[in-house]
Image (cartoon, rainbow, N blue to C red):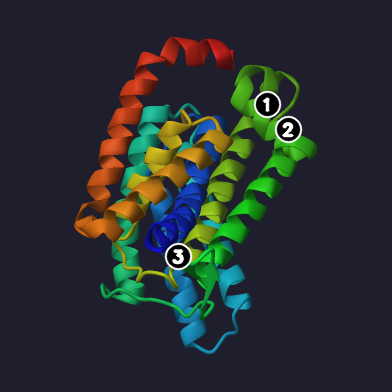
Amino acid sequence: MSAFLTYLLNGLAVGCAIALIASGLVVIHRVTGVVNFAQGTFAVVAGLCTSSLLGLGFPHGLSEVAAVLVAAFAGLLTGLAAIGKPGTTALSSLIVTLGVGVLAYAVEIVLWGDQPRSAPGLAGSVTVAGARIQTQHLLVIGVTAATFVLLALFFGRTYLGKALTACASNPYAARVVGIDVRRMGLLAFALGGLLGGIAGVLVTPLRPISFDTDVTLIVNGFAAAVFGALTRPVITLVGALLLGVAETMAAGYGYGSHQLEVALGLMLVVMIVQASRRPAISQELT
């Protein structure tokens, strides 16, 4: 039972990291209609930046904040490439994000090489109901909870958040009342980069990050985002937690090499279910 609880708590932490990646996908898709397949790249950039800054002697806190800001800037640049030109279709923008992800491989190899890097995090572990969980995992859970609360307040209580929501609900009406939809789209990409960067700095102390780690991150994030129909952050969080627990259980009980297959299998099942419910979802959203 203690082993089961350990896997469960660690799975929740993994799910929280996935949720941050997935929430960036949801924010961008809600505002622009674009599926950003470069989302995992933002986490990788932030993780590699954190490793480099800490290696140069910069203190914790400053290194992580600087890395997250770099990821947000990378998100803004991706937005400029994907939706910067007026009239670009969502499909064309999706292809652009794939190209950005491939280009990022080359840039990351030039700057950091092709060997995995890690960074020190919170040391030690705590015991909860007989289960041991790393302190860094608790940090991941706490930061994710705080991030989702702040996102809810941002979208529900601020003018800027309401403007982003308006663009997601009805872009034409948003333009009529004077909201710059393209600017809001770029802001959504920057916010997606910020969320991906937070995931990156939290995950890097737990597992080494390399230029191609974004594949696993985007597969997991997209699976969770699909669970929330790419529009619902709270349901996306639930999907990410379920996915994180499923992967951790698979690894803990001897199937660690099949974690990616677990994510892909769950994503396929969810997509089939979502496709069968599409009329109901469309009606609810309208």
The N terminus is located in which quarter?
bottom left
Residue closer to the observer: 34 or 214: 214
Tag 3 and tag 2, C-beta contact below 8 Å? no
User: Marks 3 and 1, how far apart in space?
Assistant: 33 Å
Q: How many marks?
A: 3
Name the residue rendered at 35%, 18% in the picture: 275
Q: Which residue is mark 2?
A: 162
At mark 1, the secondary structure is helix
Q: Whole-Å distance between the Cαs marked 3 and 2?
A: 31 Å
Q: Do the residues under discs 2 and 1 have CB atoms within 8 angstroms?
A: yes
Q: Which residue is mark 3?
A: 203
- Crowd around label 2: few <14 · some 14–19 · many ≥20 (10 Å): some
Residue kind at label 1, given as amino acid type: Ala
* Residue 218, disc: none
Secondary element type, mark 3: helix
Residue located beneath label 1 in the image: 166
Identified by mark 3, the residue type is Val
> Residue furthest toward the bottom?
57
Percent position of residue 216, x then y: 31, 53
3 or 1: mark nearer the eye: 3
| Three-letter amino acid code at the position of disc 2 | Lys
Residue at position x 30%, y 44% from top? 263
